[in-house]
Amino acid sequence: MQFNLTTAELFVPDGLSGEQALARTTHLCLAAHQDDIEIMAANPILTCFQQKDLWFTGVVVTDGRGSPRDDLYKDYSDEDMRVVRFVEQKKAAFVGEYAAQVLLDYPSKMIKDGSNKQAIEDLVKILKATRPQFVYTHNLADKHDTHVGVALKVIAAIRQLPKDEQPQKLYGCEVWRDLDWMTDTDKVPFDCSAHESLQMALVGVFDSQIAGGKRYDLATMGRRKAHATYFASHGTDATTGLSFGMDLTPLIVDPAKDPGVYVQEVIQRFEKEVADRVGKLR
Ligand SMILES: [Zn+2]
């Protein structure tokens, strides 16, 4: 498969041809950076793990050149970091038994540019080659520009597909902001109870980021445990790990719906819930 950048890569852990590997995909995650997939999409990775008919494919849109670095990586050039992060992402794809892993290699500034359509063209190609039932990307209330840039390009790409080629569901997931604040009726809970050691391995292979001074491994597992316990105030915990998603499917069902307006409506429902409770108890 040819992408816009000749440096883009398609990695297939079990060695199947690229075309066959992508075609078996049922769950597709489109993320900004190396490690975002493993932070935000553990549930679909676990759902597909060791299943004959369910396959997870990961796509990382950016190049990893601007990553923070410390410890044994502190003197690495931007190009060295790119190589390290590509290798780490492939390690995760191997550990998680992904159908395929695509690395599109775009500089972040191209993704933060709303007028740049190159990545959208690649995403359309990937969506056509994979025909997934379920698509996962960043949520629209994330606080990282590149993450929201990817989410908007994913929405734009899906909107270009004929209706019968669109996924059943599109979810925005948690990295740089939890979705714990959303009203419970807006939250899509993703059970992350199974295979805890595999989840830890998936976030643990990104040594260049963790050694860079950020314990994403511990923070990610901690967030899943916190969500599991704090989701419901009554009764015992139904899960031992939980992630939350923002349902973005209405944005593909109605292509005229503005993503900015859509996320504002989610925030307004949160605002009303808080105001109503304080008003009721005052
Ligand atoms: Zn990221």
Image: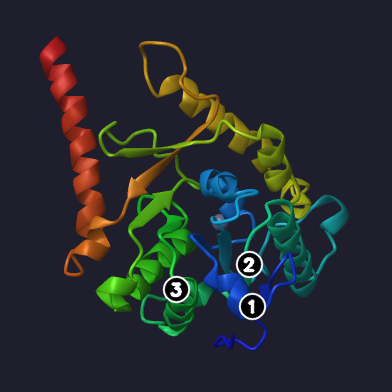
Question: Residue 138, percent across and down?
Answer: 44, 55
Circle 1 is placed at which residue position? 18
Query: Between marks 2 and 3, how big is the CA–CA gap?
Result: 13 Å
Q: Is mark 1 on a helix, strand or loop?
A: helix
Residue hosting label 2: 100
Amino acid type, mark 3? Leu
Residue 179 falls in which quadrant of the image?
top left
Residue at 63 percent across and 54 percent down: it is 35
Left or right: 137 with respect to 70? Answer: left
Residue bearing the label numbered 3? 127
Question: Does 89 sit left or right of 36 as displayed?
Answer: right
The number of callouts visible is: 3
Q: Position of residue 238 (x, y in %)?
A: 46, 21
In this view of the protein, which residue sits in the foreground, 267 or 17? 17
Determine whether the beta carbon of the residue marked 2 sits less than 8 angstroms from the nearest atom of ligand 1: no
Q: In which of the image's four quarters is ligand 1 placed?
A: bottom right
Amino acid tagged 1: Gly
Residue 282 visible in the shown view: no
Tell me which numbered mark, 1 or 2, is placed earlier along the sequence.
Answer: 1
Q: Residue 142: percent from the left, percent from the top?
A: 42, 51
In this orientation, which residue lies closer to the viewer: 259 or 212? 259
Instruction: Please tell me whether mark 2 sits on a helix, a strand or a loop.
Output: strand
| Image quadrant occupied by the N terminus | bottom right
| Residue at the spot 73% in from the left edge and 63% down from the top edge | 90
Indicate the quadrant containing the C terminus: top left, top right, bottom left or bottom right: top left
